């Protein structure tokens, strides 16, 4: 994958750690809204050092650059991060929990483009 595209993709995930991630599973019942609120509190409490997030971004970019096929799964979160995201976080010296990254989100590389589906029921869009 082109380095510029890999950098943009890695930055998108790192920015979720920097700025807070959308924690929406699509459910609107009372118990799910409370769970989303509690997860948001956990997210705010998990302040991560800027240098750790930068290391995460670099590790993720390194992984994305290594992708050579034309159609490849890159990273996703249902509630917990996929192994690709978890491995990048481990290399950065941090753990990602259930409230770290946006729920129901996936990113794939297809036809030279990165496609992002950010959140429950979201329409895929080009990054």
Image (cartoon, rainbow, N blue to C red):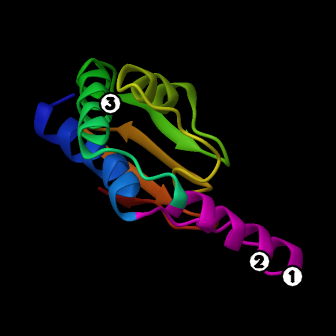
7 lies left or right of 118: left
Q: Which residues are magenta?
A: 20-44
**Residue at the spot x=88%, y=74% of the render?**
31
Q: Is residue 112 left or right of residue 117?
A: left
Q: Are marks 2 and 1 in contact (CB under 8 Å)?
A: yes
Measured Cα–Cα span from mark 1 to mark 3: 36 Å
The secondary structure type at the circle numbered 1 is: helix
Which residue is at a point 77% across and 67% down the rendered structure image? 35
User: Foreground: 75 or 11?
Assistant: 11
Residue corresponding to mark 1: 30
Q: Residues within 10 Å of mark 1 (few under 14, many from 20)?
A: few
Q: Badge 2 is on which residue?
A: 33
2 or 3: tag closer to the N-terminus: 2
Magenta region, mostly helix, strand or loop?
helix
Per the model, the C-alpha gap separating discs 2 and 1 is 5 Å
Quadrant containing the N terminus is top left
- The residue under label 3 is 60
């Amino acid at each position: 994958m082109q380095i510029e595209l890999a950098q943009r993709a890695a930055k998108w995930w790192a920015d979720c750690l920097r700025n807070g991630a959308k924690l929406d599973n699509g459910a609107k019942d009372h118990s799910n809204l409370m769970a989303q609120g509690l997860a948001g509190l956990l997210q705010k409490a998990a302040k991560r050092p800027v240098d750790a997030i930068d290391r995460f971004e670099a590790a993720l970019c390194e992984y994305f650059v290594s992708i050579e096929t034309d159609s490849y799964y890159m990273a996703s979160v249902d509630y917990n991060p996929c192994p690709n995201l978890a491995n990048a976080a481990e290399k950065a010296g941090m753990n990602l929990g259930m409230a770290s990254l946006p729920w129901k989100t996936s990113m794939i590389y297809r036809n030279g483009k990165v496609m992002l589906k950010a959140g429950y029921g979201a329409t895929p869009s080009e990054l």
